[in-house]
Amino acid sequence: MELILDSAVIAEVEEIAAWGVLDGVTTNPTLIRRSGGDFKRTVQRIAELCSGPISAEVTALDTEGMVAEGRDLKESLPDNVIIKVPCTAEGLAATSILAGEGIDVNMTLVFSVSQALLAAKAGAAYLSPFIGRLDDRGEDGMHLIAEIMQVWNHNPDLTCKVLAASIRSVEHVEASARLGAHAATIPYKVFKQLIEHELTDSGIESFLADWDAVKAEGRN
Ligand code: E4P
């Protein structure tokens, strides 16, 4: 499963990229706003730090505008930048045009199996079902991932990658992996939690204490 960082903060991308496990980065207008940085400069720098797909989102709502923004982002930013397009009728048409030009699209704001199917049929390279936002309103986001993966398992012709998004917890990441999601985009805070385990910490402590004893006996 591809592990993607959901962030527009350069320092966060640098830190996680240094782990050697980062497959890509997703940004959105909210993350860009929070980062305080200039949109294109931020995406450019992220694309230099991580060679995997870096999602940059269009903001137009009409097909023509989305296609124009997508082409501009593709031309002005590094090759590994892919275009995030919202899951609307206009977004489907834009996706089909951009995909026809060889431009990879991440169809975002997917909340149902039917939207996922349409995104795949339009030619998106990734589709992003938002788990947390469904949970936030009392629905079961993981259930949507399970349903989409069930459809994908029965339809090998669907090659669009399912990118679990709006992740809130380590459990979301693990459940997405168990269900066979192709990728998960993970906020920085949760990414850091993926490596944490108290038994790892206490294990290191006891190994170090024993190694100190070995050294004290001159047996190192
Ligand atoms: C996905 O690409 C989005 O950037 C992201 O996962 C949205 O998550 P949120 O619901 O926490 O804003």
Image (tube, rainbow, N blue to C red):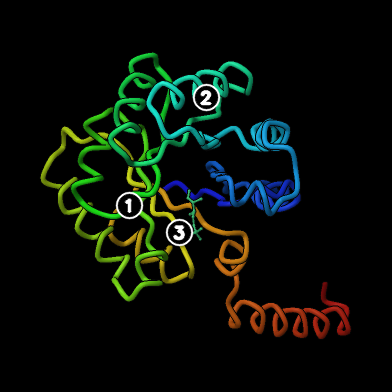
Which residue type carries mark 2? Glu
Q: Position of residue 64 (x, y in %)?
A: 41, 21
The residue identified by callout 2 is 69
Which is more foreground, mark 3 or mark 1?
3
Q: Nearer the viewer, residue 39 or 190?
A: 39
Which is more foreground, mark 2 or mark 1?
2
Q: Earlier in the sequence, mark 2 or mark 3?
A: 2
Give the CA separation, mark 3 to mark 1: 14 Å
Give the CA separation, mark 2 to mark 3: 24 Å
Q: Position of residue 130 (x, y in %)?
A: 38, 57
Which residue type carries mark 3? Ser
Local packing at callout 2 (Cα closer than 10 Å; few below 14, some 14-19, many 20+) is some
The quarter of the image holding the C terminus is bottom right
The residue identified by callout 1 is 181
Residue at (48%, 32%) from the top-left corner? 60
Q: Secondary structure at mark 1?
A: loop
